[in-house]
Image (cartoon, rainbow, N blue to C red):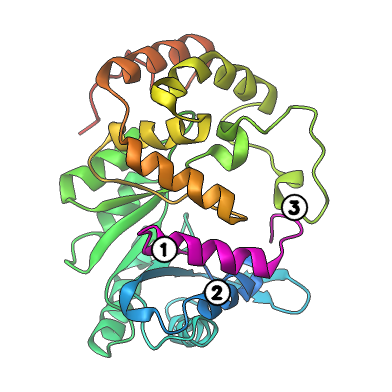
Amino acid sequence: MGWGKVDDKDSQRAIEVALEHGINFFDTADLYGCGHSEEVLGKALTGKRPDVVIASKFGYKFNEQTKIVTGRLNIPDEIEDALHASLKRLRTDYLDLYQLHISDFPETAAEAVQDRLEKLIVAGKIRSYGWSTDDASRVSAFAPSKFCVAVQQALNVLQGDLATLAATERRGMASLCRSPLAMGILTGKWSARKALPGNDLRSRWNHSVGPVPTMVKVVESIRHILSQDGRSLTQGALAWLWAKSDTTVPIPGFRNATQVLENVGAVKKGPLTEKQMLAIDKIVSRDFPNNPWDLRRTQHPA
């Protein structure tokens, strides 16, 4: 459940650099590294808690020693236990945002989850909650409460669901963009022939959007647009998300301070222009069959 070998000192330094440059929202999950991501983040943010917004997720059981996922939580009964474990690893007594991590959790059971999360809000353990899902109907089932403020969905130049994005827009919710760089494909560093180590989860990754060689080819076709105005390819991919909707909040991962600074540079340059967005959509629609941003579907579904 990791992305290969990572140096914790590099990670902590990267978080410090992010803070120095005004980045104050950090999204993680108990599942990431089977607890290790929360531990690293908690250590790096010690003494800085009032200045940051921390989001984490729940839904799965795992073994912290073997780094193996063992199943799903018994929800809602085990939510509070999972939260207490996350709070301990993160060295805090509350979370700003707590998200259901199981994307296909039954809609019929959503109300019971909300009831439990609302009790945790009353207890001061969390301040708001959301759902990590790419299903608009689940957004609708989970959203009526004023404390449900965010949906985390897979959203990038190559991937996304219009109905789910529209659901966040209608309700004024944040759309936290999971995989804003398509797990590295939109950084330009991915190759169809690139071999990844076995401890990198992407080595076992069958991308749901399409074959990696096809996606790499499409990215090369739009590189010249994403890289305009002095942007790197990565910065252009983030700028695309800001231009796509007023609700989007990209959450790019990072391994080191250099990557953090590249992300910060994207903020400074702002969103793409409407002209650039149309040019990208035209190319992607032509070269990437069944993509979600097909120009023939210019309006969000109701």
For the point 49% across and 28% down, which residue is it?
158
Q: Can residue 172 be seen in this view?
A: yes
Element assignment for label 2: helix
- Count every numbered label the image shows and give the total: 3
Residue position marked by numbered label 2 in the rendering: 38
Q: Is residue 6 magenta?
A: yes
Mark 1 and 3 residues: CB-CB less than 8 Å, in contact?
no
Where does residue 208 sit, x and y in percent of width and height? 58, 36
Q: First in sequence: mark 1 or mark 3?
A: 1
Name above or below for residue 190 compared with residue 95. Answer: above
Element assignment for label 1: helix
Residue neighbourhood size for the residue with mark 1, other residues' Cα within 10 Å, grouped as few (<14), some (14–19), many (≥20): few
Residue position marked by numbered label 1 in the rendering: 20
Residue position marked by numbered label 3 in the rendering: 200
Q: Is residue 58 left or right of residue 150?
A: right
Image quarter hosting the N terminus: bottom right
User: Quick one: 224 or 1, which is closer to the camera?
Assistant: 224
Q: Can residue 178 be seen in this view?
A: no
Mark 1 and 2 residues: CB-CB less than 8 Å, in contact?
no
Q: Is residue 232 magenta?
A: no
Where does residue 106 sit, x and y in percent of width and height? 42, 60
Image quarter hosting the C terminus: top left
Where does residue 135 sit, x and y in percent of width and height? 38, 46
Q: First in sequence: mark 2 or mark 3?
A: 2
For the point 51% across and 52% down, which residue is it?
260
Q: What residue type is labelled 1?
A: Glu
Q: First in sequence: mark 1 or mark 2?
A: 1
Name above or below for residue 257 compared with residue 65. Answer: above
Chain part drawn in magenta: 1-28
Q: Which amino acid does label 2 sit on?
A: Glu
Q: What residue type is labelled 3?
A: Asp
